[in-house]
Image (tube, rainbow, N blue to C red):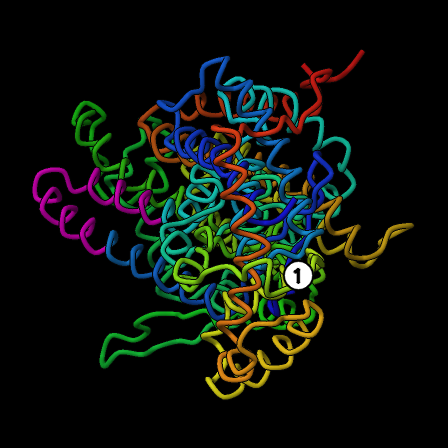
Amino acid sequence: MNKQRFLKERRPAWQRFEQLVDRRKTGGRGRLTPDQLFEFSQLLRELSNDLATIRSRDWGQGLVNHLNHLVARGHNTFYRSTPASWARVFEFLAVGFPRLFRRNAGYFLVAAALFFVPLAAAWIAVQTDPTVALRIVPSEQLEMFDAMYGDESFADADDAAADADTSTEPTPDEFDPAGFGEERAAMAGFYVQHNVGIALQCFARGVLLGVGTISTLLFNGIFIGAIAGYVLSLGYTERFLSFVVSHGSFELTAIAVAGGAGLMLGDAFVHAGQRTRLESLRVRGIEAVQIAGGAAVMLVIAAFIEAFWSPAPIPAVVKYVVGGVLWLVVACYLGLSGVRR
Amino acid sequence: MSLGLELAIESPENVVLTHPLAGPAPRCLAYFIDLLIRWGVLFFAAIVAVIIASALPGLATGTFLLLLFLLEWGYTIGFEFGWQGQTPGKRFCGLRVIHENGQPLSWWGATLRNLLRVGDMLPFLLLYGEDIGVLAALPVYGPGIVCMLLSPKLQRLGDLAARTVVVHERRSPLPRDPVIYDHILPIPPTERNAIVPRSETLALVDQFLGRRSVLSYQRGHELASRLAQGLADGLDYRGDPSAVVKYPMAFLARVYVTFAITPLQEDADAHQSPRGRPLVAEGTR
C-alpha cells in the first residue's frame, strides 16, 4: 500500500467524517440520526486505524497532523462528559452537597473555630470597651453602621426599639412596600457580589497552603465580631439581633463551610497521606470545590434573606422565631439531608 | 516529530492522539482579550444602569452589582463549561481547555480551575489614575507562571488541581501533493532495472519534495544530489546522467512518479471504481 493509493482510497471516508463532525458541532440542531450515529462510530474507528497506519509508515507530519486533528475532534464529540441537567443540580443540592460536607466535617469544625472564636472574642472585647472598635474597623465604616441602625428609615414595628432611639420614630403605616422592594434590590445585588465573592476567595486562597483561608477567616471573624459588639454597645440590641438572626443562619455557616473547603485544599498539600502531594490536591480539590459551590449557593440564599426579609418592618418576635427556624433548617440540611439508612 | 510540547492521549480505539500544549504567551493574550470584553460589557452596563437609575435606582444598582459578580466569577466558568473549554478570548486564540485524559471539560473541572485562579494570579499590579486612586488591578500571575514553567504539561495551580490542560487547536488542512508531480513523466522501464524502491525510501522522497521550500536552494540541491545519486545507482538509471547531477530534485520527483503515482493510475484504469476497504471487521456490527 503506497501513500497515494492509501489517500485515494481513504479520503472519501475522511471527508464524510469531517462532514458529520461539523454537523454535530453546530449544537442541538445538529443531532445525528441513528443511522448517521452508527456511521459516525464506525468511521471513528476506521479513522483511528488510518491514523495508526499513517504514523507507522512515516508518510509526513502534515498528513499525521491533519488526521490527528480530525480524529481528536471526533473523539471529543463522541466521548463527552455527562451533560448538565436540572435534575443533577437538584440532586447535588439536595443530597450530594450535604453528604460531601459531612464526609469532610472535620475541616468545617476547624474553620468554624477559626471564624467564630475570634468573632466572639472581638464581640466581647468591643462590648466591654467600645473604643477597641476604632482599632479594628475604620471610623468611617463605624459611622456608617451607626447611621444604618440609628437611621429612622430603618423602620421597626416593635415598640421596644423606640426606647433606644432618640430621634422621631416613624409610624409603621408610612411604610411603602414598592419603595422598600426597590431599595432592597440594590442591597441584594451588593450582598451577592460582596459575600459570595468573599466566600469564594476564602476557599480559593486555601490553595496557598491554607494560609489565605485562615487569614480570611480570622479577619472576617474579628471584623464582624467588632461591628456586632460596637452596634450593641450603642444600644441597638433589638434592632441588630432581629436583623441578623435570619440571614446569619445561612451566611455565617456558609462562610465557615467555604473556609473548611479552603482548609481542605491547604491540608491536601500538608498531609498528603499515602498519595503524592499533587495527587492529594487533585483528589481533595474536586471534593473541596463542590463544597465551596454549595456554600456559594447558601450565600446567595442568605443574600436574598438579608436584603428582603431581615430589614422588613415585622415585629422582632416574628423575626426571632423565623430566624430560629432557619438555623434549624440549616442544621438539618447539612446534618441530615441524604443520610443513608 | 514536531518540536512543541505535546499531550499524548490514548483513545479507547487504542490510537494515540496528540494535542499541542499552549504556553503562557497565548494564554496571556487570551486572558487580556477576555478582560477587555468584560470591561466593555461593564462599561455598557454602567451606562444602561445610569439611564435606568433615574426611574428605578435600587433595581439598577442591584442588577449592576449582580452583573459585576457574574462577570468576575461566572464568566470563565460559564463559557468554559458551555463552550466546551473555550472563552471568547481562547476561541480567538485557538485555545481549548480539556482534561488531561482528553475528555471535554466537566462542570466541576471548570469551576475548580477558575476559582483557583485567585491563588494563581497573585500578586496584583495596581494602576493608579490621577486623583481617582486605583484605576485597575492587573494580575501578575506569579504562582501561576512559576507553576506552569515547572510542570511538564504547562499547568498552573488550578489546572493541576482540576486535571486540565490548555491545548492549541490548529486546524491543519490535508497537505497537497507537490505540484511538480503533475509535470513529470515516469522513467520508462527501458532506462532502469526491475528493482522497486522500498516504500520508506519513496516516503522520504515525498516528504523531502513536499517540504523543500523550507531549505535554501543551495542546501536543498546538495541534499537532493546525494539522494538522487543513490537512487540512480540503485535503479541502474540509463538515461541522461547529467539530469541526475544538474536537476536532482526533478530526478527524485521522477522516481516518485514512476513508482508511486503511475501504478495508481494504471490501477484506476483497470478497475473502474476502487472502493474503500472495510477496516472494521464485519463481526463488530
Count how many numbered circles sit on residues in the image.
1
Question: Going by the image, does B78 lie left or right of A104?
Answer: left
Please identify the dominant SS of the magenta region.
helix
Q: Residue furthest bottom?
A: B218
Q: Inspect this view and state whether residue A221 appears.
A: no
Report the magenta residues as a range: B43-68
Which of the two residues, A191 or B23, is positioned nearer the viewer here? B23
Number of other residues with Cα within 10 Å of mark 1, as a class: few under 14, some 14 to 19, many 20 or more: many
Q: Which of the pair A85/B105 is nearer the observer?
A: B105
Location of residue B233 (image quadrant): bottom right
Coordinates of residue B272 in the picture (x, y in percent) = 47, 28
For the N terminus of chain A, the image quarter is top right
Position of B15 relative to B254 (above/below): above
Going by the image, does A86 lie left or right of A26?
right
Who's the residue at 67% across and 51% down the image?
A55
Horizontal and vertical percent position of residue B277: 61, 28
Q: Is residue A162 left or right of residue B29?
A: left
The image quadrant that residue B180 belongs to is: bottom left
| Residue A138 shows in this picture | yes
User: Does the magenta-highlighted stretch encompass residue B83?
Assistant: no
Label 1: which residue? Answer: B153
Amino acid type at circle 1 is: Lys
Where residue B240 sits: x, y (%)?
Answer: 53, 77
